Image (cartoon, rainbow, N blue to C red):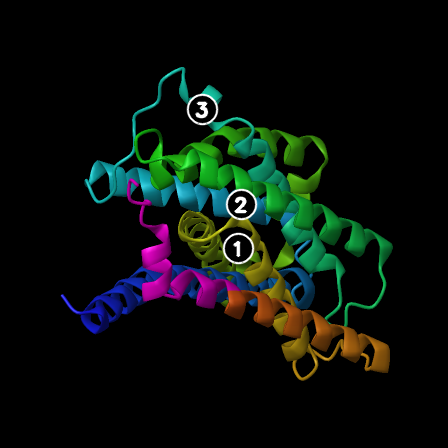
């Protein structure tokens, strides 16, 4: 085989291996983007009082979808046994922290990201939980153990009941059940849509963490947040223009896009012919 043919095959193989990384990152970014828009409508436009209850709905949707899919042999993951909590820990705690902090920050912050101490604390917590979630998810989705569907299912199972108890004890559940817009068909549709998008977001997070690094997943999430801010400049009416704010948003977006481009380009770059020769073991003298 000639050097040209070898280089062509290497380039083709590299492009094929890069495709899942790109598609999984786009899938995660799209799901993350859409769910923020829907949640912003629920929590801000309708003034839904309970981010925690919304999180419970998303966990319940995940459990239901995966359980029915397992019964119909669409997906496969191991049945419960006493070793599963040990295998999964501490991911359920990180998962629920990421979930609730993300929903809470969505309800507290304006599109212009103007200073709000409570909102920024939730954003900081969400950044920490997101990074930790990416790292531990990549460790836990070994197909020989729980696999990606098992991680999703048991994560939701282990945390939905404690979250319901916390919601009930704080009065959060009562506020949600007595919310005035439950008879509003459009509100109910968006609530159900948010629950379904919650499942897709968790699934896309697992896929993106599997095919990419945890840092790449985090950076894609950051790009999504900045994209939401850009849209908020024109839609929603809560953006207040500031030169420093606008410059900061553009710096964040440029940095995130640059990192993503270099990461995907570096992973897809084929090994040069000279590099292949340098990797060959030295011949015996």
Up/down of 239 relative to 40, above or below: below
Residue 248 x %, y %: 77, 73
Q: Real-space Cα distance between discs 1 and 2?
A: 7 Å
Residue 51 appears in the figure = yes
Residue in front for this viewpoint, 233 or 204? 204
Up/down of 136 relative to 231, above or below: above
Left or right position of 38 against 60: right
Residue placed under numbered mark 2 in the picture: 134
Instruction: Categorize mark 1 by other alpha carbons within 10 Å: few (<14), some (14-19), many (20+).
Output: many
State the extent of the magenta-drawn residues as a range.
263-285
Label 1 or label 3, whichever comes before in sequence order: 3
Instruction: Categorize mark 3 by other alpha carbons within 10 Å: few (<14), some (14-19), many (20+).
Output: few
Q: Real-space Cα distance between discs 1 and 3?
A: 22 Å
Up/down of 84 relative to 223, above or below: above
Give the label on residue 217, or none: 1
Query: Is the C-beta separation of discs 1 and 2 under 8 Å?
Result: yes
């Amino acid at each position: 085989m000639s050097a040209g043919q070898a280089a062509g095959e290497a380039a083709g193989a590299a492009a094929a291996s890069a495709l899942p990384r790109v598609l999984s990152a786009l899938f995660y970014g799209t799901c993350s983007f859409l769910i923020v828009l829907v949640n912003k409508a629920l929590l801000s436009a309708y003034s839904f009082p309970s981010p925690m209850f919304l999180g419970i709905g998303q966990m319940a949707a995940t459990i239901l979808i995966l359980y029915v899919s397992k019964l119909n042999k669409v997906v496969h993951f191991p049945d419960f046994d006493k070793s599963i909590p040990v295998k999964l820990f501490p991911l359920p705690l990180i998962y629920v922290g990421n979930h609730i902090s993300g929903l809470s920050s969505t309800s507290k912050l304006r599109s212009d990201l103007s200073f709000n101490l409570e909102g920024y604390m939730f954003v900081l917590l969400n950044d920490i939980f997101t990074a930790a979630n990416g790292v531990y998810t990549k460790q836990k989705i070994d197909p020989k153990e729980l696999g990606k569907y098992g991680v999703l299912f048991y994560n939701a199972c282990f945390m939905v009941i404690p979250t319901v108890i916390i919601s009930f004890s704080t009065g959060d559940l009562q506020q949600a059940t007595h919310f005035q817009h439950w008879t509003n068909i459009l509100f109910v549709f968006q609530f159900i849509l948010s629950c379904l998008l919650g499942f897709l977001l968790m699934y896309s997070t697992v896929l993106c963490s599997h095919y990419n690094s945890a840092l790449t997943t985090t950076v894609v999430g950051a790009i999504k947040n900045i994209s939401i801010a850009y849209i908020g400049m024109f839609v929603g009416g809560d953006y207040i223009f500031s030169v420093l704010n606008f410059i900061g948003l553009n710096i964040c977006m440029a940095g995130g896009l640059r990192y993503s481009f270099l990461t995907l380009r570096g992973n897809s770059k084929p090994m040069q012919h000279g590099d292949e020769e340098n990797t060959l073991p030295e011949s015996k003298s």
